Amino acid sequence: LATKPRRKFDDKTEIGLGWLTQTEGSETILWHNGGTGSFASFMGVNKAKQRAIVLMFNKSLSDEVTKAGFEYLLLE
C-alpha cells in the first residue's frame, strides 16, 4: 500500500504513502529521498532491471544524491 500511487505529483511522477513512482522512458522507478541538517539520502528500485540502490551522504546534497541514484538505476 505504501508504494501504490495515489496522486499525480507531476507529468512523470505519482506519489503514494511517501514513495514516488516515476516513469523514465519505458522504465518505472520507485524512489524516495530526503535530508536533514547536513545529511542526504536516496533509495530507489528499478524492478525491470532487478536493480536497487541506497545512498547516504554526510553532506546536504539532496539533488545530487537523487541524480546519482537515478543514473545508476537507468544504466544500460
Image (cartoon, rainbow, N blue to C red):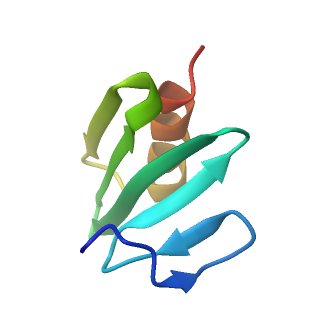
The image position of residue 44, as x and y in percent, is 37, 45
- In this rendered view, identify the residue nearer to me: 47 or 73: 47
Tell me if residue 44 comes above or below residue 19 in the rendering.
Answer: above
Q: Residue at x 26, y 70 (%)?
A: 37
Q: Residue at x 45, y 66 (%)?
A: 20
50 vs 1, left or right, is right
Farthest residue to the top: give it. Answer: 76
- In this rendered view, identify the residue nearer to me: 57 or 29: 29
58 vs 10, left or right, is left
In terms of image quadrants, where is residue 69? Answer: top left
Tell me if residue 62 comes above or below residue 45 in the rendering.
Answer: below
Quadrant where the N terminus sits is: bottom left
The image position of residue 74, as x and y in percent, is 57, 28
- In this rendered view, identify the residue nearer to me: 72 or 4: 4
30 vs 64, left or right, is left
Farthest residue to the bottom: give it. Answer: 7
Tell me if residue 31 comes above or below residue 49 in the rendering.
Answer: below
The image position of residue 11, as x and y in percent, is 75, 70
23 vs 45, left or right, is right
Quadrant where the C terminus sits is: top right
The image position of residue 49, as x and y in percent, is 44, 24
Q: Residue at x 36, y 41 (%)?
A: 45
Total marks shown come to 0
Q: Residue at x 36, y 61 (%)?
A: 32
